[in-house]
Image (cartoon, grey):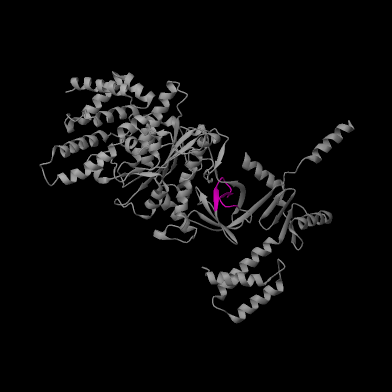
Amino acid sequence: MSTLLQEIEAQISGLKTGVTRQNVGTVREIGDGVAKIEGLSDAMLNEMLDFGDGIVGLALNLEETEVGAIILGEYTGIKEGQEVRTTGKLLQVPVGKSLLGRVVNALGLPLDGKGPIDTQTFYPVEKIAPGIIKRKSVTQPVQTGIMAVDAMIPIGRGQRELIIGDRSTGKTTIGIDTIISQARLNRAAETAKDASYRPLYCIYVAIGQKQSNVARVMAVLEEAGAMPYTIIVDASASDSATTQYLAPFAGCAMGEWFMDNGMDALIIYDDLSKHAVAYRQVSLVLKRPSGREAYPGDVFYLHSRLLERSARVSEKYGNGSLTGLPIIETQAGDVSAYIPTNVISITDGQIYLETDLFYQGIRPAISVGLSVSRVGSAAQIKAMKQVAGRVKLELAQYRELAAFAQFGSDLDPKTQAQLERGKRIVEVFKQPQYNPMPVEVQAAVLWTVQNGLMDDVPVEKIKDFQAKLTEYLTSRKAAIMDKIRREGAFSDALTAELKAAVTEFKQTYR
Amino acid sequence: MKLSKQARRDARELFRTCMVRDALDESRARQAVASVVQKRPRGYIAILSHFERLIRLEVARRTATIESATALPPQAQAEIQANLARHYGAGLALQFMENPALIGGVRIQVGGDVYNGSVQGRLALLQQNA
């Protein structure tokens, strides 16, 4: 018996008392969501600080005698003299597939009332972008389903393509269309059990948006069945500037998880102008020196480090990718303002949307002359390259001729033909919203217009002709569509088949 | 009060002259304050208030507050002192305090570092994790 007692005593004496060292400080000043804390000698940059009662802060300024911290969430309960603890953890958010289909805030907490998120994996919000060794050039396409984009401004997986334009020119719509298109492709590949298709998961980050807009986007995505492949990170206009500042980084961390695990993801930052404004507010209350337009000096680095995290990594590192579609809102079409020029110079191209085109009824209102994709053409499928190669040039020529032709009516037949063709191409590129088109249909339609098979259709009937031709090809000539999709290029035999099919359709069309 | 950069810089300079081998020299600090009060340079109130803050933080950094539910026996006090000296170097000012609210155990604070081995601390931790 005595040995048992000794054993137990030995066990007890061996137990640790559990005293841990903590670093504490006291709140010296609090206001506008920013606290100045005295003490906290061990605080790290970007470390989470515990204010008690579940309130979390983020250490952003480490000064000689104090720490400047932003408070994430409700800050009205914090008092002067309150104790603050370091946590030893950098700010992190939950990541993983269980976030798909959910609406979360900038800290990864659910907002949709569907219960807690079941994940054990966390990623730091701030992370250094993959280096040159890990990267690979862009080769796989992102099919946005928008014909004008896929044909003329193709986007590849791992690319960063800016969507820029004035208010209400359809910037968000391009992003939403892309998400819907991915969901359709993902679902089609799932039902066909196509293991070679790499699904593309989408993350929509709403920064400083109206709650009603976010709710509408959510409803559209749910109706289109795209939510199971989508994460929405919401930091709306009523949330504090600090959460608005963090939201894109949180969304990016969620996307990086897919990239690191060999999957493909696409992230839409809607929009980065509001993000810059939120960051300006945070910086000014932290008393950081201001620069041009009162933005802090590191507003360029803010966006460059965020967008650099979009990448395509090589096979050795998992072959994943993160495609970035940042959105910037311009004022009265001024692309030469501070934030737009910054983001234009960081990204691999831009889709420029124009108010004039929008009101002329050309929707999506993409300005072909100002839009460019610097790396995407390497990711375009061959069939698309074959038919779309000359489109951009022809459209540019059409624009020039159309301006010129306004002054005179007697034109030579060649110019006349070019004008007529241009009008038809413009018509063909018009597309209603939330209606992405499969790439084989896009290629077939473009082939038809390129080869003059639409020249005898009146311009006002082009849309009707296109709709009926699409229906005919997808329902009656599904084999040809299938061939285009599988082969990915127009061979002579395929061209002949397609020509026969279109000619046959034209005989029945009236 | 809004502190000017110059006042901040002057106070820091003053504070640096009061440090001898990484420790605050009290007589020098007193001398410095007396001299500033006598000469009254531009913005001297701001300088002195920032200087006071620097001194306060420095004193807090070099002070160990040891709280326990009941008074500690001299042997335990000596043990704690030796342990702290090993961690933070010699020259720590020790303050032993009784705090029945701790229920049991010891809570030691040196500057911003807190070692909480009290029953109250454990209960708070339990409450936080529950």
Q: Residue at x 47, y 45 (%)?
A: A308
- In the image, A395 versus A210, the foreground residue is A395
Q: Which residue lies furthest to the bottom in this view?
A: B39
Image: A66 above or below A255: below
Q: Position of residue B85 (x, y in %)?
A: 77, 58
Can residue B71 be seen in this snapshot? no
- In the image, B17 versus A347, the foreground residue is A347
Q: Quadrant of the N terminus of chain A?
A: top right
Q: Quadrant of residue B15?
A: bottom right
Q: Does the magenta stretch include residue B108?
A: no
Image: B100 above or below A269: below
- In the image, A433 versus B110, the foreground residue is A433
- In the image, A304 versus B119, the foreground residue is A304
What span is in magenta? Answer: A44-59
User: On the picture, is A430 further left or further right than A89?
Assistant: left
Q: Position of residue A350 (x, y in %)?
A: 36, 44
Q: Residue at x 66, y 41 (%)?
A: B126
